[in-house]
Amino acid sequence: MVNRYTRLRKAALAALLLTSAWGITPVSAQDRETLTWVLRDFPPLTIFAGPQTGQGAIDKLMPELIARMPEYDHQIMHVNRARGTQILQDPDGFACDPTLLWTAERDKTILFSIPTYATPGNGVTIERSNHGLFEPFVTGDGHLDLTALLASDTVKVGIVGERSYGPVIDKIIRQTSRPQNLVLHYGNAAVGSMLQMERLDRFQAIVSYWPEARFHAQQQGIPLNELEFFPVKDAPKYQFAHIGCSKNDKGRAAMDIINREMRVLRVTRLIGFYAEWMVKKEEYLHDAQTFFDEPEH
């Protein structure tokens, strides 16, 4: 983490030198605020351990974004979801998280950027050997009716505490008549831990992003042909993520810069960084041509 932080500081310093070369007066060091970036271990966006440490899509983005924000000093803080949320909701804090889904509840206390990247929607990952348990709930187009599954009392499903899975899945989880069939997991590398628990039959399915589940399975030596993924009925193919910052004057000032820079970086850099982790890379790149055609929200 120290080495990574040093690289980020060097990138920001290089940007300062560049502004000087063009005759732009940089903000003096004593006047700069420190912007804290809270990052979770969230492969394939951020990778904290193993041979691919620092090679996630957001890992690669951060030095480039930071270099474009010489107005600030920057520090990286590794957190779990609960701690990250607590830091962002501090009314006197100055922090940002580059990997957030927008929700109405979060919007009350967190400032959101323009959409920055699109990820394939969350779904349900199971052990292929348990396929028969889920077959009655699979629609003709291969989507899983998660509402009916949870109501059936036939399986238990693992979810990450305080994570948003998007409006469709969040609503299903919130309104299920059988909350006892949901097993919450907190802490770091939650999806990786839940894959192990799933193999031990503590529960029979987990809700996650497929690229995330694939990454953890490969790290643990779980053959991918032993897993099966179902998109959830009525959930969108893609979900758009945002950068979330402290909802105060400092956060608003930083967000003006973030939005300006991400209008460029999300197209020129981040789409390519994320596509490297897609199972269907060419399909993702094709779809990405229209990701940001709609009005920003």
Image (cartoon, helix red, strand yellow):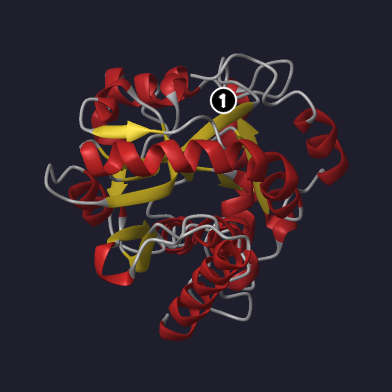
Q: Position of residue 167 (x, y in %)?
A: 42, 21
Check disc 1: other Cα within 10 Å, few if <14, some if 14-19, many if 20+: many
Residue found 31% across the figure and 60% down from its top = 36
Q: Position of residue 214 (x, y in %)?
A: 64, 56
Q: Toward the viewer: 256 or 78?
A: 256
Up the image or down, 30 lies above or below 80; here it is: below
Identify the image quadrant of residue 183: top left
154 displayed left or right of 294: left
Identify the image quadrant of residue 123: top right
Disc 1: which residue:
232
State how many labels appear.
Answer: 1
Residue 162 at least partly seen: no
Q: Position of residue 161 (x, y in %)?
A: 28, 45
Q: Toward the viewer: 27 or 258?
A: 27
Residue found 18% across the figure and 49% down from its top = 86
221 displayed left or right of 114: right
Residue 235 at least partly seen: yes
Amino acid type of the residue that numbered disc 1 sits on in the rendered structure: Val
Up the image or down, 74 lies above or below 243; here it is: below
154 displayed left or right of 122: left
Q: Position of residue 273 (x, y in %)?
A: 70, 54
Q: Seen from this angle, which residue lies furthest front? A: 23
Identify the image quadrant of residue 78: bottom left
203 displayed left or right of 225: left
Up the image or down, 185 lies above or below 221; here it is: above
Q: Toward the viewer: 189 or 238?
A: 238
Residue found 40% across the figure and 57% down from its top = 71
Secondary structure at numbered mark 1: loop
Pick the quarter of the image with the N terminus. bottom left
